[in-house]
Image: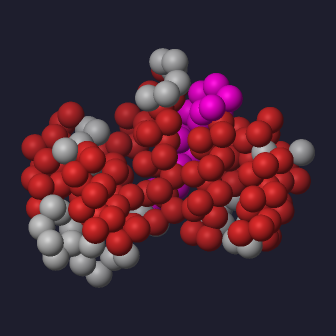
Amino acid sequence: AGAALARIALKDGANSDMAIAIASSAVPHAGELLDRLAGSEQDLETLTSLLRTLISTAAANGKADALANFASKLAKSFPANQNIAAWQIGAFAQLLDEQGKLPANEALANSIRSALPAISKAARQIASDATKSAELRANAARLLGRDDNLAAEDAAALASMLQSQHPEPARKAALERL
């Protein structure tokens, strides 16, 4: 069923009604669905909301190993030029949020730890880039302050985002991370 849901998601997941149907059917298959979507090599930009829902669903059902596999595939999909896509930022931010709700899982922690430096660097650049959308900048801010090795840089980036020229969603996300 997960394979069929992945095919449907890749074909019609941008349709909000279809995304709701997929998400409601995915509860027992969220891990397999995430695995297949991450391995699809397609641009998943139109599936950002669905991916975040699937990550939350997998976490709520204790599927830490499935999330570890997704995190590993997600990290491998990051381009070498640091031009990380909005869907990757949103999915990784959701993974980090959900990780704290799960019992400790070494595979998930290792997958996240290995990807964190690259995505943190990209997130820091995106968060302060006025040409990026408010939603993308807010998602980028959600990633900052999670890598102990970059705490000072992230704190400075987040503090600068509190200025009024930044969009409200980005300021709110920055404040929540400080």
In magenta, the rendered stretch is 59-79
Is residue 79 found left or right of 26 in the rendered image? left
On the image, the x and y values in percent for residue 162 come to: 15, 61
79 over 109 or under it: above or below:
below
State the predominant SS element of the stretch in magenta.
Answer: helix
**Residue 60: which quarter of the image?**
top right
Q: Is residue 73 above or below residue 164?
A: above
Quadrant for residue 61, please give it.
top right
- 84 or 156: nearer the viewer: 156
Q: Is residue 118 visible?
A: no
Q: Nearer the viewer, residue 15 or 65?
A: 15
Is residue 65 a member of the stretch shown in magenta? Answer: yes
Question: Hey, which residue is sitting farthest bottom in the picture?
Answer: 131
Q: Is residue 7 above or below residue 177?
A: below
Residue ID at (65%, 57%): 50
Image quarter in which the N terminus is found: top right
**Residue 47 in the image, given as x and y percentages of width and height:** 63, 64
